[in-house]
Image (cartoon, rainbow, N blue to C red):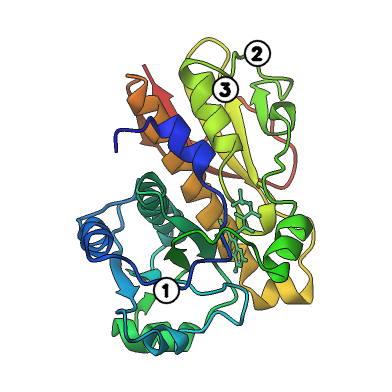
Amino acid sequence: MGHKIEDIIRMRYSCRSYREEPLSKNDRLNLSEFVSQKNKGPFGSSARFTLFAAEASDSKELKGLGTYGFIKNPAAFVSGVVKESAMNPEDYGYSMERIILHATEMGLGSCWIGGSFKRSSFKEKAGIASDEVIPAVAAIGYIAEKRTVTDRVLRTSARSRKRRDDDEIFFSSSINKMNMNFTEGYGRALEMVRLAPSAANVQPWRVVKEDENNIFHFFLERSASYTKIMKLLRYKDLQRIDMGIAMCHFECTAIESGLKGLWKKESPVEVNTPTGWEYIITWDGE
Ligand SMILES: Cc1cc2nc3c(=O)[nH]c(=O)nc-3n(C[C@H](O)[C@H](O)[C@H](O)COP(=O)(O)O)c2cc1C
């Protein structure tokens, strides 16, 4: 433990092949304690997270939770339940990503799963109320040395690890290139946003910095079109989860660098953003 947030963020990737090995007792206790801690996203909603980990003799227990074959031998799943509310996907992304980063720091592999899981089985296991939802889950386990073919194909087709350049996602208030050193201070926090995972690796976050101060406006640029399969995967909501993940990376990095600030909903009046950008939130930094 004790890794810097940047190291942890750089270490994480979507792992889809795990060793056929249950979590050790220590890891199980550590992780289940972490997931059951009180959490609150920047928009005020909390999620109730549960760790579903197979016991040594009982890997069948997880089989029922099925992920349609994309994930090989997951030792555990983390699943969370939230009450339906306007900004719960963002809050959920933010809180679940903290868990993913904690698991990464423990040396575990992980993968966000937004579409290809059996919602009904998770709902049954989690005991969900009628006004609650499970926006996404995460697979967790010990990283296998050898990747399966599906893992390799998925990683290539989702262009995993490839990211947009900073000038495609970070802008000045006139929507030109943001003038920033991306290796320190807020620049480093933005670089950690750039490296964040996102559904289908679309990287829908756009950040505009006010020129004279540390005010950063976060926007969502939704995919131009949704294919049938994307609709089936409830892709629209997944992009809002992506936003919450980005906020988690930004805030954790800023705070670790000693930068103080607050999330505020304060739609910027002077910024003339391209059509299709949806305003989400502002970081108001000192
Ligand atoms: C909200 C969300 C949902 C995701 N859903 C899935 C999924 O259902 N199946 C899958 O194999 N990967 C899924 N991913 C993983 C992304 O494909 C992956 O994060 C992206 O391709 C970037 O690769 P990296 O995580 O290895 O950096 C999801 C990621 C996010 C953030």
Disc 3 target residue:
209
Q: Which mark is residue 134?
A: 1
Labelled pair 1, 3 in contact (Cβ < 8 Å):
no
User: Which amino acid type is shown beneath numbered disc 1?
Assistant: Ile
Horizontal and vertical percent position of residue 104: 42, 48
Labelled pair 3, 2 in contact (Cβ < 8 Å):
no
Look at the numbered disc 3 and give the secondary structure of its residue. strand
Q: Residue at x 60, y 52 (%)?
A: 198
Image quarter for ligand 1 equals bottom right
User: Which amino acid type is shown beneath numbered disc 3?
Assistant: Lys
Which is more N-terminal, label 2 or label 1? 1
Disc 2 target residue:
179
Which is more N-terminal, label 2 or label 3? 2
Horizontal and vertical percent position of residue 168: 74, 32
Look at the numbered disc 1 and give the secondary structure of its residue. loop
Tell whether circle 2 marks a residue whose Cβ is less than 8 angstroms from ligand 1: no
Q: Residue at x 51, y 66 (%)?
A: 18
Q: Is residue 33 left or right of residue 54?
A: left
Query: How far, Cα to Cα, is label 1 from label 3?
Result: 33 Å
Q: Is residue 190 left or right of residue 226?
A: left
Callout 3: few (<14), some (14-19), or many (20+) C-alpha neighbours within 10 Å? many
Which is more N-terminal, label 3 or label 1? 1
Q: From this view, report whether residue 186 is shown above or below residue 237.
A: above
Q: Residue at x 39, y 56 (%)?
A: 96
Q: Mark 3 or mark 2: which is in front?
A: 2
User: Which amino acid type is shown beneath numbered disc 2?
Assistant: Asn
Q: Quadrant of the C terminus?
A: top left
Q: Quadrant location of residue 70?
A: bottom right
Labelled pair 1, 2 in contact (Cβ < 8 Å):
no
Q: Residue at x 24, y 63 (%)?
A: 32
